[in-house]
Amino acid sequence: MAVDFIGPPPRSKNTKHSLIASELQSHPGSWGVVQKSANIARASSAAQAIRRGRLSSYLPAGTFEAVARTVVEHGVVEHRVYARYVGGAK
């Protein structure tokens, strides 16, 4: 296995989660699908991490709501994470 030495990790401003959190904050109160997981357990874990603010992008805890749902559309099963921003003004 090769190692790529490309510098330090990016600051949180450009991470996937900070971009998702920013997008949710731009549409307060609106639910969005923020992830599709391989199974409902992974979707539930991701939703819980968002609710509890385990990632700094979703702090303080309680400013985001998230739920995991299994959805079947046209015979296709997806395990989705829905989230929304419920905190104060950005």
Image (spheres, rainbow, N blue to C red):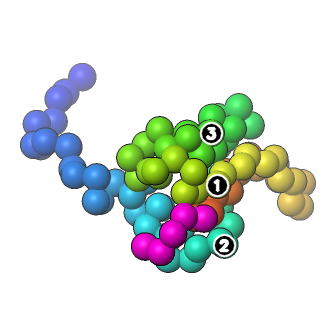
Viewer-nearest residue: 85 or 68: 85
How crowded is the residue under tag 1: few (<14 C-alpha within 10 Å), some, or many (20+)? Answer: many
Q: Can you say which quadrant of the picture contains the C terminus? A: bottom left
- Label number found at residue 6: none
Residue farthest toward the front in the current orientation of the protein: 88
Q: Could one spot residue 38 in this view of the protein? A: no
Viewer-nearest residue: 31 or 75: 31
Q: Is residue 38 above or below residue 10?
A: above
The answer for how far apart the CA atoms under marks 3 and 2 are is 18 Å
Question: Magenta span covers which residues?
Answer: 86-90
User: Hey, what amino acid is under mark 1?
Assistant: Glu
Residue plotted at (39% across, 58% down): 18
Q: Which of marks 3 and 2 is nearer the N terminus?
A: 2
- Label number found at residue 65: 1
User: Which image quarter: residue 83?
Assistant: bottom right
Main SS of the magenta part reads loop
Viewer-nearest residue: 49 or 42: 49
How crowded is the residue under tag 3: few (<14 C-alpha within 10 Å), some, or many (20+)? Answer: some
- Label number found at residue 30: 2
Q: State the image coordinates of residue 40 (x, y, percent, origin top left).
A: 74, 37
The answer for how far apart the CA atoms under marks 1 and 2 are is 10 Å
Q: Could one spot residue 52 in this view of the protein? A: yes
Determine the secondary structure under disc 3: helix
Q: Is residue 66 above or below residue 29?
A: above
User: Hey, what amino acid is under mark 2?
Assistant: Ser
Q: Can you say which quadrant of the picture contains the N terminus? A: top left
Question: Which residue position is annotated with label 3?
Answer: 48
Determine the secondary structure under disc 2: loop
Q: Which of marks 1 and 3 is nearer the N terminus?
A: 3
Q: State the image coordinates of residue 16 (x, y, percent, origin top left).
A: 40, 55
Query: In the shown orientation, is residue 76 left or right of residue 22?
Result: right
Residue plotted at (19% across, 27% down): 2
